[in-house]
Amino acid sequence: MNSRFEIGEQDFLLDGKPFQVISGALHYFRVHPDQWADRIRKARLMGLNTIETYVAWNFHAPRPGVFDLTGQRDLGRFLDLVAAEGMYAIVRPGPYICAEWTGGGLPGWLLADPEVGVRRHEPRYLAAIAEYYDQHLPLVAARQIDHGGPVIAVQVENEYGAYGEDAEYLRALIKLVRGHEITVPLLSCDQADDAMQERGSLPELHRTVTFGSRATEKLALLRRHQPTGPLMCMEFWNGWFDSWGQHHHVAPPETNAQDLDDLLAQGASVNLYMFHGGTNFGLTNGANDKGTYLPITTSYDYDAPLAEHGAPTAKYHAMRSVIARYAPVPEELPADPEPAPEFAVTLSTGLSLLDAIDAGLLGDTRHWDRLPTMDDAEQWDGLIAYRTTITAQDAVLTVGEARDRAVVLLDGEPVGVLSRTTHDTTVSLPRRAGELTVLVEDQGRVNYGQRIGEAKGLIGGARTAVRELTDWDTVSLALDPLGSELLSALDRGARLDPSAPVSGPVLVAGSFDTVAGADHFLRTDGWGKGLVWVNGFLLGRYWSASPTGTLYVPGPLLRERDNRIVILDLHGAARPRVGFVAGPDLGPSEE
């Protein structure tokens, strides 16, 4: 049944009647697709009437010439599930989304060209956006409310006032969006700051605001910039993201509930950011750099009302009670999940990462007569191995900058770490000739601020005590997915002593039986830093640096027999053993 969603003088109007949007953010790209329906249903049971999602450009277009809308990238199926639950949808396709997602959603391959104008009116950038919109906006248009679908609004750009003030750029985006027969209201979104609100929108866009407290004050600021029409907080921050090396962020449920009550009491609409955070699977986490580079953790739990593994929290129930004062809330409550299976797995085989590189199992070698970046090597995430030969006189390695972290080895022996976070750019070398390997990890592209689009790898040259190093080989490590030849070699690898330490960098593997379809929580105590795959799916990064103590393993990944686990650790482990525990450990908080 076709309906109309419009902006009235004071309210959103659904078929001509005032409608208060009570929405929650749920990013399809952070949730296993077999769990989308469960998370959407739990949003409805909390009293929400709308689901908001970003669209992450680089998730659909990991390489030039590729655009994937299948499987976990099936945006159309996600929106159809929203509709099936009787809910509405707000779509925020950027092109820039922030979202603590690598690069803020902007593809590294696009911004590797220094002539491309980031987030401004520049022909190459706009041409790429036009192609991006061509790929997915038609499926959004077909699912608009006036076509019988769930989509009631589309946002243009994201918090643009915090970055720039190119009105011509925003008008070009509006033209591109409307050119795809998007007829629903177009929104902008900026922080509760007068200058940002002024710079980040146009009269053709309905302004919204972002904040986490002091609703009356922040909505009054928005009203100064949006004199008519409904007031809406597009991101009501009911939690916060975590960064490696920091504490776990929490926000008191009772405080969030009171702030939400203050907001809804004024008749304003809201989008909870986040309703359900989910997980930065694979190599998708972003990073911030305001003088100190801080990569985002794999868990994007966000202290949201619905936890990373889909469990209703105390915040869920507190906010549900508030919503019930303003809108119908179903009587049904979601059940609490059962404890996850608990057991240990001894990993049985191992393969030196450097041996795998030497054998060509992770990618081909390229030779350079200069120090390239990862972007020069056309690698947009993950790990790259740099190799060169040194002499006994070289004595030290120093680079302009390591983006973002590098393990330095001489003839396979670890000799130091270069780190963007701690600004370590120099490592002393043993006074002997040999092969120098520098394993550089992109820990997440910056997702906010002026450093969006910067190159990764070793930046600004490399030299020793006596010379500049210009003769390099590189191997871009193919990690997602791992190749069949590598996995076969790992099966044939060295048998591991279950009681002995494991020396890194190393790949290790094992198998386990468990309860099929049950969520699991993997602990990597005693391990350093690396990646984990379960049944071929790259869960993401772990790190002893804290805060996160577990990796979430979605139940749909697991079968009853012969589940395969592979770990790549850059430093090594106390012993080749991991454990599955009953629930998540997101780390210590400041409370």
Image (spheres, rainbow, N blue to C red):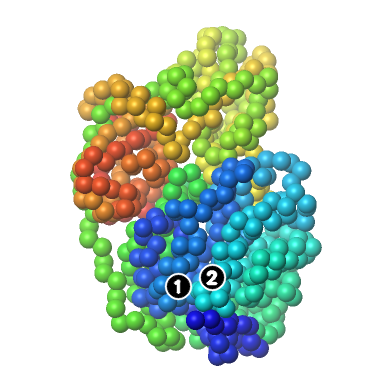
Which is nearer the eye, 76 or 428?
Answer: 76
Dot 1 alpha-carbon crowd within 10 angstroms: few under 14, some 14 to 19, many 20 or more = many
Q: Residue furthest bottom?
A: 17
Residue denoted by label 2: 143
For residue 501, what is the image quadrant? top left
User: Helix, strand or loop at disc 1?
Assistant: helix
Question: On screen, 340 above or below 38?
Answer: above
At label 1, which amino acid type do we have? Ala
For residue 132, what is the image quadrant? bottom right
Which residue appears at 21% of the width and 42% of the height? 561
Q: Please tell me the numbered disc located at residue 100.
A: none
Tell me whether circle 1 and circle 2 mark residues in contact (CB < 8 Å): yes
Which is nearer the eye, 428 or 470?
Answer: 470
Which residue appears at 59% of the width and 22% of the height? 366
Dot 2 alpha-carbon crowd within 10 angstroms: few under 14, some 14 to 19, many 20 or more = many
Q: Residue 216: give x, y in percent of width and height.
A: 57, 81
Residue denoted by label 1: 83
Question: On screen, 294 above or below 187?
Answer: above
Which residue appears at 26% of the width and 24% of the height? 496
Q: Residue 504: give x, y in percent of width and height.
A: 39, 26
At label 2, which amino acid type do we have? Arg
Q: Which label's residue is closer to the chain start, 1 or 2? A: 1
Tell me if I can see residue 168 in this picture.
yes
Q: Residue 310: give x, y in percent of width and height.
A: 34, 62
Question: On screen, 446 above or below 347?
Answer: below
User: Helix, strand or loop at disc 2?
Assistant: loop
Question: On screen, 536 above or below 56?
Answer: above
Tell me if I can see residue 543 in this picture.
no
Which quarter of the image is occupied by the C terminus?
bottom left
Q: Residue 362: give x, y in percent of width and height.
A: 47, 27
In three-dimensional space, the C-alpha distance between marks 1 and 2, rounded to whole angstroms, equals: 9 Å
Which residue appears at 45% of the width and 45% of the height? 282
